[in-house]
C-alpha cells in the first residue's frame, strides 16, 4: 500500500494518543443539561420550548432559522428550567435551553436497538431531508451544517466523496474509536452519503498511525466502491484542502470549497451520525468525546449527550487532576482553551484535553530571527512572519493581497516558531479585520 | 478552583528555540574547528577564544549600557558570530585586531540595527570586511599550516587563490598548479588561508549535520556551490590556460565557509526557497566574477554582503507558491 | 597650474548655470497651483497628525477646511475652539464652537471588585484577547487591561495603573482625538464633555447583562436597577440594555445619583471630599 500525503508544509507534533484503543464508554445523561441553540456555523436556531415544558430525548427544541443553520434536539428528557443566556466555551453568553433531567424517555420514532439496518431504499432526496431534520453538522470540529454540503450548487458536480478519518490532532482518538467499533454503521453511513450526494466513488483517508483502523475499514469496504487510502502522518492532514490534495492531488482554489474540484469531504463522525439519523431516526444528540491528558489515570473515549457540562464529564472520568492548568475543548493544535468548566459539551466537541501546569504556558516571546520555519511549514504557502508584522502594525489592507484569508488557522506556524512568537494570534486578528474590509467593500 | 490559563490555539509548541538552533550550528562547526586547531595550533586557539569572548562581552555591554535592554549575550548567537569571525581571520593575527573585528561585527554589524533579527548584513562578515579594509597587511599574511607553537611569529605565505591571481599575470594555469597544494590537501585543509575555511571536508561535514538537524535547508549552500562550479566550469572549458578548473575554485578560499555558514545566516538570507535559490545563484556568480576578473583574489565575503543587501528586495517580490492557485484535474 | 584652476572654475560655473536654467524651466512647466491659504491653515493647526479629525494628517484637514463649503463635521479636537477660531480668522469664516471633551474609561473592574478567574496567556493586545474570550475577569463587557488604548495614544495621556489594572486618562494631556475610543475593542472609552476643574460623574460600567449575572463577576457593575434614573431631576440619565447612561450634556453634577447607586457603579471624580462622610453601601439591594 502506498501512503500519500499533502505536498506543502506541515509539522509533526508529538502524537500523545493516550486513549488509543480504549473502548467507547456510554455515559448516562447529566442531572442538568444546557443545550446551546448555536452549536454550528451559521445562524442560531430558533427556540421552540418555554420554561416549564416537558421534553423527551430526541424532541426538537430549536429549529433551523435559515439555509445555513440546523435543528437542535433535546438530548435528555425532563423539564425546561430556563431559556436564557448561558456561558459558552469563550466565556461570552449565548442563548441556550437548560433542562432538569428526569428519567430517560425517548420519543417513539427513534429506533434504539443495536440491530444493524442496511440497504436503504430511500431516494436521495429523502436522505438529504432526514439529515437536515436530524440537525447533523460536521463533527470534525468546524460544525458546518451537513445538509448544506449535500446541496451541490448549480454548475458544479460532485464526483467523489472523501471521508475524513485522519484525526491528525494529537491526543484525540474519538474518530479512531468510532472506526474500530462502529465500522458497519460507518460504512452504511458512507453509502448513504454517496447516495445523497449522487456520487459513485468514496475514499476514506486514514493516517498511518492507526493501522488497525485502516485494516478494519479495508475489510469491510472490500468489493464496494468505497476505498481506503492510508496516509503518512503529518499535521494538518485533516484539513479539508490538505486531505483533498493528499488523496486526489487536486488543489482547492484560493477562497473556494472542495466542491470546486468535484469533491465533498465528511468526517467519519458525521458519516456515523448520518447512519443514525437516516436508518434509526435518531437526531444528533450525542457524540464521542475523548477525555485525555497526561494527568488522567485512564484517558478514554466517551459517548456523551450534547449539553452535558464539561465539569460533570470530567467528574465521571475520575475528576480534575490537581495540577491541571489549562482545559482545552478539542485538540492541542486547534482546540479552544476553556475559561471555566461550567460549559456544555456541544456537537463540535471532539475532545477535552487537560494540560498540566508545566506544559500549559507559552514560552517567552523573542524577536524574530527570520529562520523561515513558519514559511516552510505553512500548508497554504503563506508567509506567517510577514502577516504577523503587518497585523501588528495594523496594515490590514496589505494583508489581503498576501492571501491572509487562505489561512486555515492550523497553528503550524506558531507551533514551529523557535522564538515562540504568537504568529497565529495576530494572523487571526488580521483575518477578522480583512474580513471587515471585504464585507464593507461588498456592501458599497 | 484553579485559575485556568486561557490562550488562543495552538496549545502545543516545538522544543526548538534560538539557543538550540545556535548551538546546533556551533556543534556543526566543531570538526572545522578541530582541523583548524590541528593545523594552526596555538594561534587558532588564541584567535577563536579572543573572538568569542569579545563578541559576547561587547554584546553584553552594548545591550546593558547603551540599548538598556535585557542582554541576550548567552543565547548562542554572539558565540556563533565570534566563532565565525575567528574562522575567517588568519590564525596569526594579533589579538587586539581580533577584538576590533569583534566590536565591528557586534557593534556595527548587529546592534546598530537593533540586535538579533534586525541586522541587514551578516555580522561576522561585517567584522571581517572591516578588518580587511583597516588592516590589509595583517589580514593577508597567512600562516603556513603545521606551526603548532607559533602565533604572530609564524612563517607566512600566500593562499592558493592568491597564488593563482598573482601567477596568472604572466603565466598559465598549468604552470601555476604545481605550486598549489594538492586537492587532497585542500580537502582536508592543509593549505594557507583563514583559520576556519581551509578544510572543505570538515565544513561539508558540518553542512550535512545542519541539514540533518533541519537547521538549514539545502537551497542556499548547494545553489552557491553549483553556480560556482558551473560558471567556472564554462570558463575553464573555454580556456583552460587562463582559468582554473571548478574543483580548484570549490576547494579554495572561503567559498565553503561562506556558502555553508555565512550565506545561510537566518537573519540576512531570503525567506522563501525560491528566493534562496535566486540569492544563491547571485552569490555564486558575483563570487566568480570577483575571483576571476576582479582585483581581489577572493570575493565570497563581498558577494554575500552584496546579496544580504538584496535580501529585503527578494523577500518583497519572491513569494512562496500559494496553495490553490492552479487547479489540476487528474 | 593656474590654468587648471581657471578651467575648473569655468567648467563648474558652466555646469551650474546650465542646470539652473533647465531647472527653472522645468519648475515653470510643472508648477502646481496650490492655494497659499492651505499652508497658512496648516501652520495654525497643532501638527499632531493624530487623525482625531478623521483625516490622515493635518495637511489633509487643512485642504478640506479651505475647500469645503460647510464646516459642520470639521473640527480639530486637539486644538479645540481656539485653533478653530484661528483657522476661521485666516479664512474669514465663522467657526463652529464645540464643547471640549475628554476621554473617560467606563470600567471600574479592579482585581478587588472583579476577581481574576483565569489567566490570559496569548498575545498581549486587547483586540486578540477580546476575540478569544471574555477576559481574565470574566466580564464580557469589562476592560481587558492589555493597554491597546495606551499604545495608540500619541499624547501620553493614558497609562495603565498597575494597582487597578485599568487605564487612567490624564485630563490635561488628553486632546480628545478619539484614538483610544477607536482602539478599544469593547467600546469602554467614551468622549465626555469637559467640566470645570475636570469634575466628572459617569456610570463606570457598560455591562448589559442581567443584574445578578453582572454582579456575580464584578461588585461595582451597573445592575440596571434604575434607581439613579428615578432620582435624577434633569433627565440626564437614560436606561437602556440593562445599564444606565448619564448624558454629560444634561448632567449638572448634582451627585444625587452617586449616593443612590447600590453598587457604586457611578463614579464622581475631582470633587472636593464631602463634608459629612457617608460610606456608600454596596450590595444592599439586588435585583434578581
Image (spheres, helix red, strand yellow):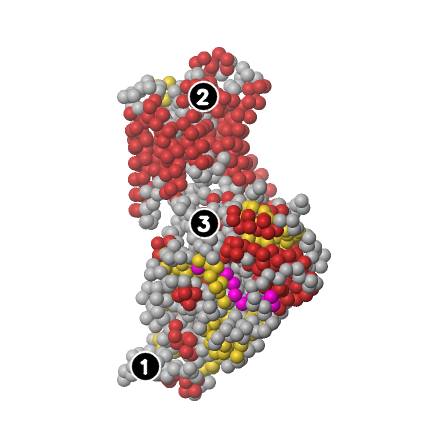
Q: Left of A159 or right of it: where is B133?
A: left
Residue matched to label 3: A15
* Numbered range of the magenta stretch: A280-291
Q: Are marks 1 and 2 on the same chain?
A: no
Mark 3 crowd level (few <14, some 14–19, many ≥20, 10 Å Cα):
some
Q: Residue at x 43, y 53 (%)?
A: A18
Residue located beneath label 2 in the image: B161
Circle 1 residue: C280
SS for dot 2: helix
The reply to whether dot 1 and dot 3 touch (C-beta < 8 Å) is no
Q: Is residue B146 left or right of residue A127?
A: left
When asked about the image quadrant of residue B88, the answer is top left
Looking at this view, is A121 or A78 the one in front?
A121
Res B330 seen here: yes
Query: In the image, is residue C229 above or below residue B119?
Result: below
**Pointer 3 indicates a residue of which chain?**
A
Q: Is residue A101 above or below residue B111?
A: below
Q: Position of residue C142 (x, y in %)?
A: 42, 70
Q: Residue at x 46, y 18 (%)?
A: B164
Amino acid at each position: 500500500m502506498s501512503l500519500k500525503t499533502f505536498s506543502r508544509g506541515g509539522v509533526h507534533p508529538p502524537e500523545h494518543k493516550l486513549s488509543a484503543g480504549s473502548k467507547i464508554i456510554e455515559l448516562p445523561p447529566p442531572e442538568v443539561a444546557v443545550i446551546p441553540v448555536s452549536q454550528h456555523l451559521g445562524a442560531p436556531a430558533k427556540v421552540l420550548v418555554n420554561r416549564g415544558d416537558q421534553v423527551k430525548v430526541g424532541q426538537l427544541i430549536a429549529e433551523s432559522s435559515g439555509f445555513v443553520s440546523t435543528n437542535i434536539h433535546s438530548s435528555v428528557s425532563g423539564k425546561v428550567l430556563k431559556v436564557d443566556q448561558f456561558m459558552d466555551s469563550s466565556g461570552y453568553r449565548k442563548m441556550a435551553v437548560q433542562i432538569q433531567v428526569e428519567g430517560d424517555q425517548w420519543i417513539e420514532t427513534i429506533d434504539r436497538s443495536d440491530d444493524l439496518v442496511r440497504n436503504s431504499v430511500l431516494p436521495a432526496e429523502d436522505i438529504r431531508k432526514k439529515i437536515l431534520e436530524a440537525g447533523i453538522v460536521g463533527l470534525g470540529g468546524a460544525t458546518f451544517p451537513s445538509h448544506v454540503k449535500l446541496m451541490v450548487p448549480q454548475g458544479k458536480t460532485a464526483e467523489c466523496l472523501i471521508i475524513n478519518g485522519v484525526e491528525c490532532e494529537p491526543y484525540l482518538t474519538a474518530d479512531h474509536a468510532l472506526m474500530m467499533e462502529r465500522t458497519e454503521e460507518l460504512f452504511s453511513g458512507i453509502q448513504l452519503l454517496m447516495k445523497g450526494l449522487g456520487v459513485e466513488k468514496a475514499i476514506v483517508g486514514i493516517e498511518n498511525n492507526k493501522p488497525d483502523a485502516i485494516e478494519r475499514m479495508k475489510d469491510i469496504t472490500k468489493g464496494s466502491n468505497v476505498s481506503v487510502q492510508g496516509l503518512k502522518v503529518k499535521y494538518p492532514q485533516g484539513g479539508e484542502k490538505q486531505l483533498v490534495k493528499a488523496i486526489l492531488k487536486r488543489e482547492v482554489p484560493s477562497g473556494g470549497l472542495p466542491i470546486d474540484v468535484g469533491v465533498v469531504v465528511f468526517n467519519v463522525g458525521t458519516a456515523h451520525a448520518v447512519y443514525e439519523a437516516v436508518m434509526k431516526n435518531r437526531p444528533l444528540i450525542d457524540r464521542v468525546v475523548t477525555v485525555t491528558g497526561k494527568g488522567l489515570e485512564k484517558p478514554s473515549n466517551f459517548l456523551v449527550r450534547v449539553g452535558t457540562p464539561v465539569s460533570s464529564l470530567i467528574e465521571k472520568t475520575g475528576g480534575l487532576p490537581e495540577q491541571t492548568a489549562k482545559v482545552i475543548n478539542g485538540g492541542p493544535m486547534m482546540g479552544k482553551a476553556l475559561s471555566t468548566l461550567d460549559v456544555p459539551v456541544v456537537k463540535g466537541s471532539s475532545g477535552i484535553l487537560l494540560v498540566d501546569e508545566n506544559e500549559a504556558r507559552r514560552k517567552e516571546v523573542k524577536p524574530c530571527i527570520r529562520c523561515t520555519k513558519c514559511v516552510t511549514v505553512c500548508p497554504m504557502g503563506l508567509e506567517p512572519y510577514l502577516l504577523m508584522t503587518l497585523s501588528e502594525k495594523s496594515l490590514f489592507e496589505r494583508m489581503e493581497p498576501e492571501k491572509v484569508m487562505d489561512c486555515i488557522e492550523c497553528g503550524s506556524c506558531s507551533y514551529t516558531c523557535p522564538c515562540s512568537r504568537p504568529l497565529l494570534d495576530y494572523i487571526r486578528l488580521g483575518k477578522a479585520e480583512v474580513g471587515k474590509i471585504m464585507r464593507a467593500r461588498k456592501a458599497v | 478552583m484553579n485559575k485556568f490559563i486561557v490562550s488562543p490555539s495552538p496549545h502545543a509548541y516545538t522544543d526548538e528555540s534560538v539557543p538550540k538552533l545556535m548551538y546546533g550550528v556551533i556543534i556543526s562547526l566543531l570538526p572545522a574547528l578541530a582541523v583548524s586547531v590541528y593545523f594552526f595550533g596555538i594561534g587558532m586557539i588564541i584567535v577563536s577564544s579572543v573572538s568569542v569572548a569579545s563578541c559576547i562581552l561587547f554584546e553584553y555591554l552594548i545591550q546593558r549600557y547603551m540599548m538598556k535592554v535585557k542582554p541576550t549575550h548567552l543565547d548562542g548567537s554572539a558565540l556563533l558570530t565570534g566563532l565565525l569571525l575567528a574562522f575567517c581571520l588568519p590564525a596569526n593575527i594579533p589579538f587586539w585586531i581580533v577584538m576590533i573585528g569583534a566590536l565591528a561585527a557586534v557593534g556595527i554589524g548587529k546592534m546598530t540595527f537593533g540586535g538579533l533579527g534586525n541586522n541587514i548584513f551578516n555580522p561576522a562578515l561585517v567584522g571581517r570586511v572591516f578588518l580587511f579594509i583597516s588592516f590589509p597587511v595583517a589580514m593577508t599574511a597567512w600562516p603556513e599550516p603545521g606551526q603548532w607553537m607559533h602565533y604572530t611569529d609564524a612563517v607566512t605565505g600566500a593562499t592558493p587563490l592568491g597564488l593563482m591571481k598573482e601567477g596568472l599575470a604572466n603565466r598559465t594555469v598549468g604552470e601555476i598548479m604545481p605550486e598549489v597544494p594538492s586537492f587532497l590537501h585542500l580537502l582536508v585543509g592543509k593549505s594557507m588561508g583563514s583559520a576556519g575555511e581551509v578544510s572543505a571536508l570538515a565544513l561539508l561535514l558540518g553542512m550535512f549535520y545542519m541539514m540533518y538537524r533541519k537547521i538549514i535547508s539545502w537551497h542556499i549552500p548547494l545553489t552557491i556551490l553549483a553556480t560556482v562550479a558551473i560558471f567556472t566550469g564554462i570558463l575553464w572549458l573555454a580556456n583552460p590556460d587562463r582559468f582554473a578548473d571548478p574543483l580548484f575554485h570549490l576547494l579554495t578560499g572561503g567559498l565553503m565557509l561562506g556558502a555553508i555558514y555565512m550565506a545561510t545566516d537566518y537573519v540576512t538570507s531570503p525567506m522563501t526557497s525560491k528566493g534562496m535559490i535566486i540569492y544563491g545563484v547571485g552569490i555564486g556568480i558575483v563570487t566568480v566574477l570577483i575571483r576571476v576578473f576582479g582585483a581581489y583574489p577572493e570575493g565570497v565575503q563581498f558577494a554575500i554582503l552584496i546579496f544580504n543587501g538584496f535580501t529585503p528586495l527578494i523577500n518583497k517580490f519572491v513569494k512562496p507558491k500559494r496553495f490553490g492557485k492552479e487547479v489540476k484535474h487528474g | 597650474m593656474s590654468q587648471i584652476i581657471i578651467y575648473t572654475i569655468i567648467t563648474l560655473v558652466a555646469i551650474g548655470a546650465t542646470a539652473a536654467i533647465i531647472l527653472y524651466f522645468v519648475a515653470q512647466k510643472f508648477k502646481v497651483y496650490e492655494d497659499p491659504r492651505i499652508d497658512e491653515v496648516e501652520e495654525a493647526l497643532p501638527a499632531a497628525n493624530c487623525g482625531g479629525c478623521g483625516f490622515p494628517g493635518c495637511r489633509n484637514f487643512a485642504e478640506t477646511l479651505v475647500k469645503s463649503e460647510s464646516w459642520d463635521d470639521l473640527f480639530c479636537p486637539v486644538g479645540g475652539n481656539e485653533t478653530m477660531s484661528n483657522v476661521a480668522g485666516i479664512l474669514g469664516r465663522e467657526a463652529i464652537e464645540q464643547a471640549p471633551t475628554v476621554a473617560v474609561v467606563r470600567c471600574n473592574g479592579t482585581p478587588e471588585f472583579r476577581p481574576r478567574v483565569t489567566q490570559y496567556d496569548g498575545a498581549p493586545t486587547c483586540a486578540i484577547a477580546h476575540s478569544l474570550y471574555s477576559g481574565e475577569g470574566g466580564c464580557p463587557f469589562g476592560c481587558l487591561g492589555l493597554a491597546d488604548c495606551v499604545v495608540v495614544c500619541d499624547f501620553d495621556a493614558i497609562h495603565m495603573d498597575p494597582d487597578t489594572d485599568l487605564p487612567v486618562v490624564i485630563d490635561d494631556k488628553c486632546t480628545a482625538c478619539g484614538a483610544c475610543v477607536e482602539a478599544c475593542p469593547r467600546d469602554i472609552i467614551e468622549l465626555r464633555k469637559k467640566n470645570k476643574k475636570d469634575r466628572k460623574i459617569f456610570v463606570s460600567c457598560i455591562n448589559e447583562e442581567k443584574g445578578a449575572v453582572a454582579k456575580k463577576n464584578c461588585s461595582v457593575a451597573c445592575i440596571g436597577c434604575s434607581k439613579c434614573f428615578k432620582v435624577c431631576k434633569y433627565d440626564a440619565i437614560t436606561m437602556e440594555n440593562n445599564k444606565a447612561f448619564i448624558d454629560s450634556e444634561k448632567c449638572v453634577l448634582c451627585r444625587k445619583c452617586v449616593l443612590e447607586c447600590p453598587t457604586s457603579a457611578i463614579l464622581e471624580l475631582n470633587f472636593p471630599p464631602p463634608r459629612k462622610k457617608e460610606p456608600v453601601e454596596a450590595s444592599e439591594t439586588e435585583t434578581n
